[in-house]
Image: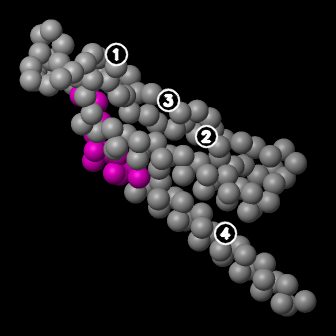
Amino acid sequence: MSMFQMGYRAMSAQMVRMNAAASNLANAGSVAGSADEAYRPIRTVFAEELDKQSGLSSVRVDRVVRSDTAPVRRHDPGHPLADENGDVWEAPVDENAEMIEMLEASRQYSNMVEAMSTAKQLMLETMRMK
């Protein structure tokens, strides 16, 4: 596995992380007629992947999991999705936490772009020396 393959995998993993946070933000404030139907935030779970041939380690998305955080019950009898008690269930999305998650994933992605750009420049400089 080359450094560029490692960078690609790391960038892909951060992109999945950003997409999960974007999905959570898009569903913030959404309501459902029951707790079971309410949106639950999702998170990516990363796993280390070791290339035995090169000894290099990279990251991959192992899975995407749904949070077990309970939806917020809100009394809103006028809402079209309200149950017989007049309650709706709101998605338990913490918008601030999701924004932090997106910023962190974006920074990690940018760091990998910078590292790969630096590696490319060093390779070009090395080729010019010969």
Q: Residue 13, position in %: x, y?
A: 59, 48
Report, in whole angstroms, how far the alpha carbon at label 1 lies from the one at label 2: 27 Å
Amino acid type of the residue tagged 1 in the rendering: Asp
Mark 1: secondary structure: loop
In this view of the protein, can residue 73 be seen by the observer? no
Dot 4 or dot 1, earlier in sequence: 1
Residue with the most extreme right position: 130
Q: Alpha carbon of mark 4 to alpha carbon of mark 1: how far? A: 44 Å
Crowding at mark 2 (Cα within 10 Å: few <14, some 14-19, many 20+): some
Disc 3 residue type (three-letter): Val
> Is 6 left or right of 31, judged from the image as shown?
right
> Which residue is identified by label 2?
61
- Give the extent of the magenta segment: 90-102
- Can you tell which mark lies on residue 36? 1
Q: Which residue is mark 4?
A: 116
Picture quarter containing residue 38? top left
Q: Is residue 57 left or right of residue 84?
A: right
Q: Position of residue 30 (x, y in %)?
A: 27, 33
Asked whether residue 22 is drawn in magenta, I would say no
Q: Which dot, 4 or 1, sits closer to the camera?
A: 1
Q: Residue furthest top?
A: 84
- The mark that comes first in sequence, 3 or 4, is 3
Question: Which residue lies under the disc numbered 3?
Answer: 65
Residue appearing at x 60%, y 67% in the figure:
113
10 Å neighbourhood of mark 3: few (<14), some, or many (≥20)? few
Residue 6 horizontal side relative to residue 85, left or right: right
Tell me what residue is drawn at x 74 percent, y 57 percent: 5
Q: Marks 3 and 4: CB-CB under 8 Å?
A: no
Amino acid type indicated by mark 4? Met
Kind of element beneath mark 2: strand
Sequence order check: which comes first, mark 1 or mark 2? 1
CA distance separating discs 1 and 3: 16 Å
